[in-house]
């Protein structure tokens, strides 16, 4: 397994519902038989998995979090998210 | 930005994350392993639409996120669409747990429109004749047709297969069928022995050899399927020697409301007759969840006796299932007797041994009592 390529298009799986949950003070992913509470950064990444490329997603996150070098963590998260079926990456 | 990642919230931080609404106990089928209460026809009248709407809103305010409509057969309720729509509006992830009877393409389309997210369909066998025999009615052909329709309408599907002696040898065929149907989740669930299933236990419990063969099939299928289909295998706790972390602990994340409005920490909790389960007709859900004696009876671990009290596993399995402890040992505060450390384990061993006995008299399965439908 390796992270999706920079040109890959990433999209959330329609199986998973991403939304803000006030009672958890966090974003959650809801799916058949499960609930996942997301960290703010995980939510920021998943919100951007809307059919844009990994490159565009990295740029948009870098604009929001200018102080850190976020790319390695984001790529690692995308790999995990794809592995769990939360997102699809094409190719 | 170091914390990229997520943590599964199995820990509800004291909130009832899962709300299960048993809309009715009426059902056109008569599965002899049915987990519904034996005396369901003596319970009070079903909640009205308005009462269910209030329950959904109150539970949502307490932090419930997952909403399941089950029964009996929830499709027998004419207000199912309205309740799904209300649940969706409130922000739940709405699940329908059904035998498929009472579903048509048109109704599925209406449910989709109402905001239904997911369907859990039960299926018993890949061979329709066996399927019909198991549920005590002509259902298999319809189940298969409706499975295809559910997929065609774009719902994610959990296919639930309750496993017993009669169908466990078909696991390979069931796996192939699930793959062909294209379901996202297949739940091969060894029957849990409560209520009708407990009455029929001697006839339902599979042999060790049957289980070993099924488990080999499951392991091979996991390899083969990878990400294409998620396979849940609910272990047979009688054979396993390890208790299940039942409901993630009593009054921890799960809330069931019965057709009569009884609030229960799990579907089977009515078995614990010594507790008086509060009714949503008489109490606010916030009080029921947080303060009622029934929901606090086995919260945490202060209620535990030995061997659980001094066992390192107690934070992981919560001493197993209270209802199973009650049903088999007569005291809900005992260690779940499936645990190898339970002084009552012999009760479970005897049942398992009986299942192995080739001279075992094959009795007749007692079908779940029909009502309505
Ligand atoms: C009680 S049924 C109600 C919904 C619907 N009538 C049906 O059978 O699909 C809910 C789910 O529990 C499963 N089930 C019933 N009795 C069970 C038992 N004793 N052990 C495990 N699962 C059981 C059914 O297969 C179904 O998926
Ligand atoms: S009898 Fe069968 S179909 Fe009916 S509620 Fe029980 S498990 Fe479901
Ligand atoms: S003794 Fe109790 S806590 Fe320990 S493993 Fe058995 S059921 Fe779990």
Image (cartoon, rainbow, N blue to C red):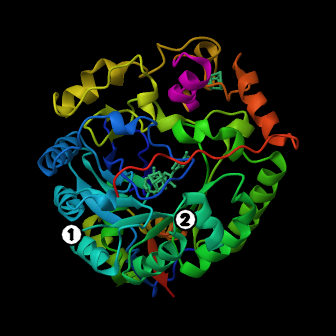
Chain containing mark 2: B
Residue appearing at x 19%, y 63% in the figure = B85
The residue tagged 2 is B123
Q: Is residue A1 left or right of residue B321?
A: right
- The answer to if B321 sits in the magenta stretch is yes
Q: Secondary structure at mark 1?
A: helix
Q: Is residue A13 above or below residue A76?
A: below
The circle on residue B137 is none
Query: What residue is drawn where x is 77% and y is 36%?
Result: B352
The x and y percentages for residue B151 are 44, 79
In the rendered view, would you say B192 is above or below B170?
Answer: above
Furthest residue toward left: B50
From where the camera sits, is residue B12 visible?
no
- For the record, the magenta segment spans B317-332
- Numbered disc total: 2
Q: Residue at x 22, y 42 (%)?
A: B59
Instruction: Name the element at disc 2.
Output: loop
Reading the chain from its start, which is encountered first: label 2 or label 1?
1
Position of residue A36 measured from the top left corner of the image (x, y, whole percent): 40, 53
């Amino acid at each position: 397994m390796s992270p999706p390529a920079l040109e890959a298009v990433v999209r959330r799986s329609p199986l998973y519902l991403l939304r803000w949950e006030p009672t958890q003070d966090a974003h959650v992913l809801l799916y058949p038989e499960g609930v996942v509470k997301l960290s703010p950064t995980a939510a920021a990444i998943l919100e951007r998995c809307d059919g844009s490329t990994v490159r565009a997603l990295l740029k948009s996150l870098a604009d929001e979090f200018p102080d850190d070098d976020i790319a390695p963590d984001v790529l690692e998260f995308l790999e995990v998210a794809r592995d769990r079926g939360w997102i699809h990456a094409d190719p | 930005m170091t914390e990229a990642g997520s943590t599964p919230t199995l820990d509800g931080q004291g909130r009832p994350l899962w709300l299960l609404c048993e809309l009715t106990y009426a059902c056109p089928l008569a599965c002899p392993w049915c987990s519904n209460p034996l005396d369901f026809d003596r319970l009070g009248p079903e909640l009205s639409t308005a009462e269910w709407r209030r329950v959904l809103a109150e539970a949502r305010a307490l932090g419930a996120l997952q909403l399941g409509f089950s029964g009996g057969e929830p499709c027998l309720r004419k207000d199912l669409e309205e309740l799904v729509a209300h649940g969706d509006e409130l922000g739940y992830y709405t699940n329908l747990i059904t035998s498929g009877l009472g579903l048509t393409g048109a109704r599925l389309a209406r449910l989709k429109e109402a905001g239904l997210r997911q369907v859990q369909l039960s299926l018993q066998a890949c061979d329709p004749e066996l399927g019909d025999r198991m549920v005590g009615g002509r259902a298999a052909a319809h189940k298969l047709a409706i499975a295809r329709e559910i997929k065609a309408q774009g719902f994610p599907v959990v296919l639930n297969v309750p496993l017993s002696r009669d169908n466990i040898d078909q696991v390979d065929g069931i796996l192939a069928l699930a793959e062909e149907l294209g379901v996202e989740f297949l739940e091969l669930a060894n029957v849990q022995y409560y209520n009708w299933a407990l009455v029929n236990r001697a006839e339902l419990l599979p042999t060790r050899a049957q289980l070993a063969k099924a488990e080999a099939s499951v392991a091979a299928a996991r390899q083969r399927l990878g990400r294409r289909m998620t396979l849940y295998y609910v272990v047979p706790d009688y054979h396993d020697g390890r208790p299940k972390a039942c409901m993630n602990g009593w009054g921890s994340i799960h809330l069931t409301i019965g057709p009569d409005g009884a609030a229960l920490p799990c579907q089977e909790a009515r078995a614990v007759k010594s507790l008086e389960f509060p009714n949503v007709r008489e109490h606010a859900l916030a009080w029921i969840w947080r303060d009622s004696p029934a929901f606090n009876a086995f919260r945490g671990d202060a209620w535990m006796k030995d061997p659980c009290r001094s066992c390192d596993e107690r934070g992981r399995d919560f001493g197993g299932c209270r209802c199973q402890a009650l049903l088999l040992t007569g005291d809900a505060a005992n260690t779940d007797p499936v645990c190898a450390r339970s002084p009552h384990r012999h009760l479970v061993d005897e049942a398992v041994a009986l299942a192995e006995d080739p001279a075992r008299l094959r009795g007749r399965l007692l079908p779940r009592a029909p009502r309505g439908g």
